Image (cartoon, rainbow, N blue to C red):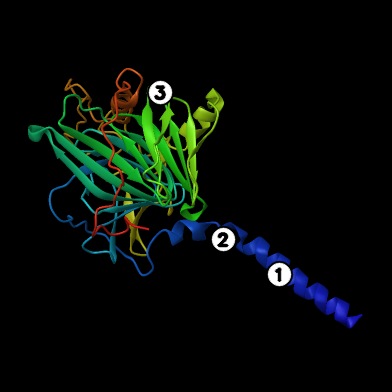
């Protein structure tokens, strides 16, 4: 009788512990994306060389780590410059949208980690070469089409695949601790997917509203054409909550991390439709894809310009540039190899 009672008490304690700790266990995944011992500095310091892009929209806690100082991170806000070698990490319920110098727009969903191994844009030489390593999570790539360039390469590498693209709107989802890569193409898009176990094999093209999956130690395989509802659900991961956008205002110091007053990186209620909106600094403008007059810098102008860049009236299917027989990763880039 006493033995059964003791066993009952132990089970009760375990059950109660699971109930109490349950809400916090999920947060461990997001925190684990940050390197152990990382120090978040309140004062942003530039990376090495010239900036290759900047943030446009930030929701929640987004951390940037420069390649030359991997033990220090910086909290992203609007207009935060990005550099070659930068690691960008979104925490739970966070998102970030940034623009590279070539006009391409990248959006990261929550709990995502990527590395800008290289982003080279030389319009005077008609040269664009970008290489992104996606470690985990979900990212949407609105790659700007550059017509007539001598060289125009944009590649995304995961643990299992390499995606080659010229100008397209697609997503890459890296799942199962990096062992599965899912590539989804949106409107008027064609990308080429290579498996890292057989880079000499012909690539698998992913066309509009199609999806290709590359598992670890396997060749790519294609799903049937996606239903409109599936496309809508995929795009939802990259939508921003207007009431949770980070601004340059109303922030406070919390355990060494700059967070907003609600304590989790959100910014409830911070939106001024009559002013700069979303905390964009005075004079900030995002030019249109064809050089037309930029918007005022408010959220609606930002969203409209981005939509036009990656919408069906901007991105047109074009022949992809030749892909090397064996894709390689630039050496010396922190976090870019697996």
Q: Quadrant of residue 187?
A: top left
Q: Residues within 10 Å of mark 3 (few under 14, many from 20)?
A: some
User: In percent of the image, x 24 and y 57: which residue is there?
Assistant: 331
Q: Residue at x 19, y 31 (%)?
A: 285
> In this image, 111 relative to 49: left or right?
right
Residue where numbered disc 2 is placed: 25
SS state under label 2? helix
Mark sitting earlier along the chain (2/1): 1
Which is closer to the viewer, label 3 or label 2? Answer: 3
User: Can you identify the residue that label 3 sits on?
Assistant: 187
Task: Please name which of the two marks, 3 or 1, marks the residue nearer to the observer.
Answer: 3
In this rendering, position of residue 72 left or right of residue 270: left
Q: Earlier in the sequence, mark 3 or mark 2?
A: 2
CA separation in Å, label 3 and label 1: 50 Å
Where is the C terminus found, in terms of image quarters?
Answer: bottom left
Residue 215 image position (x, y, % from top left): 50, 47
């Amino acid at each position: 009788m006493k033995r059964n009672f003791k066993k009952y008490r132990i089970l009760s304690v375990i059950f109660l512990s699971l109930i109490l700790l349950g809400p916090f266990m999920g947060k461990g995944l997001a925190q684990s994306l940050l390197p152990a011992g990382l120090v978040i500095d309140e004062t942003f310091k530039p990376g090495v060389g010239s900036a290759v892009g900047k943030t446009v929209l930030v929701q929640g806690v987004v951390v940037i780590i420069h390649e030359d100082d991997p033990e220090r991170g910086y909290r992203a806000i609007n207009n935060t410059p990005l550099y070659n070698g930068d690691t960008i990490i979104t925490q739970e319920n966070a998102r970030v949208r940034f623009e590279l110098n070539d006009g391409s727009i990248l959006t990261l969903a929550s709990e995502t980690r990527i590395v800008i191994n290289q982003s080279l844009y030389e319009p005077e030489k008609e040269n664009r070469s970008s290489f992104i390593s996606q470690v985990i999570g979900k990212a949407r790539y609105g790659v700007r089409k550059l017509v007539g360039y001598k060289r125009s390469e944009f590649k995304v590498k995961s643990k299992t695949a390499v995606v080659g693209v010229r100008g397209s709107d697609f997503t890459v989802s890296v799942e199962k601790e990096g062992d599965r890569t899912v590539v989804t193409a949106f409107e008027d898009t064609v990308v080429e997917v290579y498996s890292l176990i057989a880079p000499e094999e012909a690539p698998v093209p992913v066309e509009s509203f199609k999806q290709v999956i590359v598992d670890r130690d396997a060749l790519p395989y294609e799903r049937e054409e996606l239903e409109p509802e599936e496309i809508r659900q995929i795009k939802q991961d990259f939508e921003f909550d207007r009431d949770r956008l980070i601004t340059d205002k109303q922030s406070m110091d919390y355990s060494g991390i700059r967070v907003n007053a609600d304590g989790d990186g959100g910014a409830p209620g911070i939106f001024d439709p009559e002013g700069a909106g979303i905390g964009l600094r005075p004079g900030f403008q995002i030019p249109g894809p064809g050089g037309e007059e930029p918007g005022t810098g408010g959220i609606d102008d930002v969203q409209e310009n981005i939509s036009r860049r990656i919408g069906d009236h901007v991105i047109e299917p074009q022949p992809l540039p030749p892909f090397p027989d064996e894709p390689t990763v630039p050496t010396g880039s922190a976090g870019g190899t697996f």
